[in-house]
Structure formats: C-alpha cells, structure tokens
Amino acid sequence: MAVAAATVAAVVSIALGACEERLPPLPDYVAVSLNEVDERHPIGFVDQNEVLHVDVPPRARGLSHNQLADMQRFVVRYKAEGVGRLSVSISRHAGADAEVSHALADLGRILRDTGIAPSQVTRTRHSDAQRSRSVIRLSYGRPHAIAPECGHWQQDIGRDPERLHYPQFGCATQRNLAGMVANARDLQRPQPEQPRSAERRSQTWSKYIAPESTESTDAKAKAESTTKK
C-alpha cells in the first residue's frame, strides 16, 4: 500500500509539473506592465492642512510689514504645493469692521500679484471665542508622501520563468523618494513653467541666425590670448 501511494504521488507530481510547463509564458507587454515599479510599490498621499492666523488689531489701517511678508510667503507656498482652493476665513464677530476690510484689501493685492485667480479662493467665516480681536485665517491642503512598506522576502528570487522582477525590486527606491521629496505635489503633477528670459532668448536667436564661422572664432580667441599676454 505504501509503495502504491508513493507511486500515485509521483505520477501526480509529474503530471502537475508537465501541466505547469505547458502553460504559455506571459506576453511581453504583460510582463513589462507587471514590472512597473510605480504600480508594484505605489507612493501614497495624504493631505495635510497648513494654516496661518493673522490678527487684525482695532483701528488698524491695514496689515503691518511683518504680516504682509508672512501672508505673501504663505500664498506663494500655496501656489507651489497646495491642492484644492485657498480658504480665507474671517471671524464671525468681525462684521463689516473697517480694519478687516483694509486687511482683506491687502490680501487681495497679494493674491493678484502672485497670480491666484478668484476662482481658487473660498471665503468663509469661523467662530473663535478665545480671541478678542478679529482674525483672518488662511488655510490650504498640501499632499504628504506616504512611503510603501518594504522588507518582504518570502519568495525565492533564484529563478522566475515569467521574466518578472522579484517582489521587492524598486521598493527601496520608492521609499527613499517619498522620504526625501521636498514638495510631494511634484510626484503628482509637474510645476507650471516660468516665463522665459527675453535676454537669453535674444542671444540664442542671434547666434542661430548669424552663426560665427570657425575662422572668425579662432581669430577672436587668438586675439584675446595675445591681449592677455
């Protein structure tokens, strides 16, 4: 009976091995997609809330120089790393105070100078019983990168007939990238382009339409070296 059982087990293992060998290999495009590091070890994102409180003292005719600098830095940071809209909230008890109107006018100029469209700003009101004076609160959400978990080595990486990378391939790179990126929004979308330099473009275009010949370039370099001597 033991010999018969061993024989049956051997036949079954050979049959399963033969079936496994008959399976067709994965197509190239499937293997390439399964080897994509961004898909195998994705970097997660969670929104963090950035808040700036600006006190508006009574009878103020606008924001102070320090408040203007803080507000401008905050708006510039929102433009570079923020997702969603910029929230501008004032105290409920502020009403139509003149000092709040002056402060909001200063904020409006900062938004226009920074290039923030009115559609990107949400205006609300908040209750703040702990503060006796009016407060303007700016807030926005920015993404924070969450690194994938690495260190799983349960699979034998000695041989893979499907031409697939081992499970942990690229995980350490993704984890390091998530940990050292300064602005996580750069991993989600590119930054907008800045205006070109008109001076540099003019110089490059001049060289393109009137390139210097090799002889004139060599003569110019020789003259400069003689002058230095």
Image (cartoon, grey):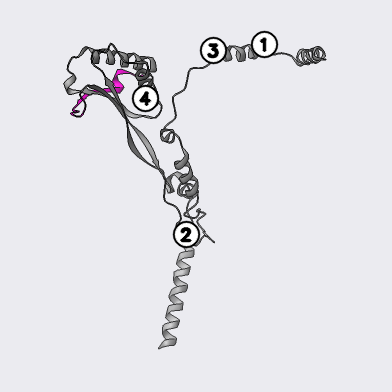
**What amino acid is labelled 2 in the image?**
Trp
Badge 4 element: helix
Q: Which sits in the foreground, 130 or 228?
A: 130
Q: Which sits in the foreground, 109 or 214?
A: 109
Tell me where the magenta segment starts and ends, as one range.
116-131
Position in image of residue 172 (x %, y %): 49, 48
- Distance (Cα) linking label 4 and label 2: 44 Å
- Distance (Cα) linking label 1 and label 3: 18 Å
Q: Nearer the viewer, mark 1 or mark 3?
A: 3
Badge 3 element: helix
In the rendered image, which residue does mark 3 sit on?
198
Res 10 label: none
In the rendered image, which residue does mark 4 sit on?
74
In the rendered image, which residue does mark 2 sit on?
153
**What amino acid is labelled 1 in the image?**
Ala
- Location of residue 228 by image quarter: top right
- Distance (Cα) linking label 4 and label 3: 29 Å
First in sequence: mark 4 vs mark 1: 4
First in sequence: mark 3 vs mark 2: 2
The answer to whether 111 appears left or right of 100 in the picture is right
In the rendered image, which residue does mark 1 sit on?
210
- Distance (Cα) linking label 3 and label 2: 55 Å
Task: Tell whether position 121 is magenta.
Answer: yes
Q: What is the count of numbered marks? A: 4
Contact flag, marks 1 and 3 (Cβ < 8 Å): no
